[in-house]
Structure formats: structure tokens, C-alpha cells
Amino acid sequence: MKRRPKAVVVGGSVAGIACAHSLLSADWDIVVLEKSRCPPTSCPTGAGVGLDPQSSNFINTWLHSSPYNTPHSIRTITLPLSIDQNQSVTGGGNKKRSQTISRDEEFNFRSAYWADLHALLYSALPSNVVLWGHFFLSFSVSDDIGGSVSVKARVLQTDEIVEIVGDLLVGADGCLSSIRQHLLPNPKLRYSGYAAWRGILDFSMNEESDTIVGLRGLTQILGSACTLILVLEVIVHYMS
């Protein structure tokens, strides 16, 4: 009987869990190492994730082929993003002008909270795939033809060092990846040329302003009790 190839995935966030599903569907044995001691709990807040149609189809394929998961569709935890519109507003007062830059009425994306998406994907995996509380330490590759990869990790609960041998190492440990740091020890950040300014203004004392009335016309989510607190931040995008 032919041995199934084995993959070691470092990082148990959405990317790592998705890699595990993809490799399982290709008949690989999978081990996911995650430094968090337990799965994150689902909550109604947190980062939002946009899923294009291809991503949704992949996820539904994984869910439908899994005997471990309920509910069985990505639609149960997502909302439709059917229109993508970019709009600019110039001037003020009577000279205010609004212009639609682009509008796509066949956008067909789905939106989900990060925690909900992670919980759905994790629940569809076999219970022994993700090793929680395992802190990645190092890896080495054998000199054999088609050499194996040996991964060392520390078990946070016992401080024990464990070694896992596989045929493939997947680095899904985020933008500060330890694996990438090993392969590219001195990467230089290069400014991508993009800067995003995001602001939230306080309209709690002026909820009948043109801005709030316009927003209510676009979405049913904002109601009269909605209070917007002033927040201003600058996001500068870098790429290596």
C-alpha cells in the first residue's frame, strides 16, 4: 500500500486551516501547529473577510465532503456583497458634487467575520489535525532525494520539544513568518506607493445630517440610535 504524503502546516489561522482542507482533499496526511492554546471563540465582532465566488465554492466543497461539520454551507455565516461601488465627493455646501467612479452590480462576493469563518472551517476538520499550544521553533530538510522536512516545536503546556517529520512544510504563520525569516533573513520593506486614510466622524448630535440620511438610504444596518465615535488612523501599505 502506497504511503500517503504528509504535510506540516505552521499556523492555525484561516490560511492554515484552509491549507489543511486543501491538502486533505488531495489525500495528504496533515498536522497543523498553532501556538494558541485553544481554538478562538466565535464572536460578532472582529475583522471582516470578503470571499470571492471561487473561494466560496472551494469552502463549500470542503464542507460538503467533511463528515464532521454543521452547518454545511458558507452561506449560513456570510452576507451577500452584491454591489461594489466607489464614489467621490468634492466641494461643500451648495457646491457639493458626488461622482460614481466605478460600480459593479455583479460583484457576487460574500462577507464573514473572521471568527465565524475560522470556526466553520475548523469544525470541518478531524479533531487530531490541529495541535494547539505548539510553538514552532525550527525546521531542517534532509539531503535525500525528495528529502523530508523535520519540524521542531515546543509544547507550551509541558515545555516538551517535539519533532514532526513530513514531506511538505507550509508556512501559514502570518506577515511576521518565522519560516520566511529563515529563508529570507534580511528582507527589505519597499513602499508600495499606496496610502489609505480612514476616518470615522461623530454624528451622534446631528443624526439627521445629509451624510447620515444618505447612509441610511444605502443600508438598513445604520439606525437612528447609531453613534459614530471619532476615530482617525493612517494605514500605510508596505510590501516586501
Image (spheres, rainbow, N blue to C red):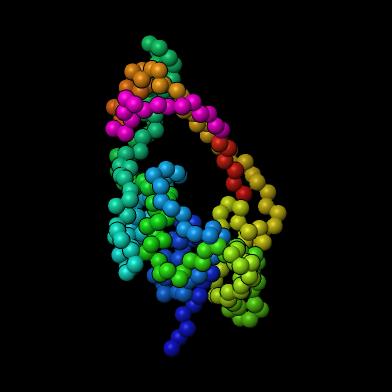
The residue lying furthest to the bottom in this view is: 1
Any part of residue 196 in sight: yes
Quarter occupied by residue 107:
top left
Magenta residues? 220-234
Q: Main secondary structure of the magenta part?
A: loop
Question: How far from the left and from the top, in percent, is residue 66?
Answer: 33, 68
User: Does 92 appear above or below 28?
Assistant: above
Which residue is painted at 33% across and 30% down in the image? 222
Number of numbered markers: 0
Q: Is residue 121 magenta?
A: no
Question: How far from the left and from the top, in percent, is residue 218?
Answer: 30, 30
User: Does 183 appear above or below 208?
Assistant: below
Viewer-proximal residue, 119 or 92? 119
- Quadrant that contains the N terminus: bottom left
Which residue is painted at 31% across and 28% down in the image? 223
Which residue is painted at 60% across and 78% down in the image? 147
Which residue is painted at 66% across and 58% down in the image? 181
Question: How far from the left and from the top, in percent, is residue 50?
Answer: 40, 47
User: Does 185 appear above or below 30?
Assistant: above
Viewer-proximal residue, 115 or 195? 115
Any part of residue 15 in sight: no
The residue lying furthest to the front in this view is: 158
Q: Is residue 227 magenta?
A: yes
Quarter occupied by residue 68:
bottom left
Left of 53 or right of it: where is 91? right
The residue lying furthest to the right in this view is: 186
Left of 72 or right of it: where is 41? right
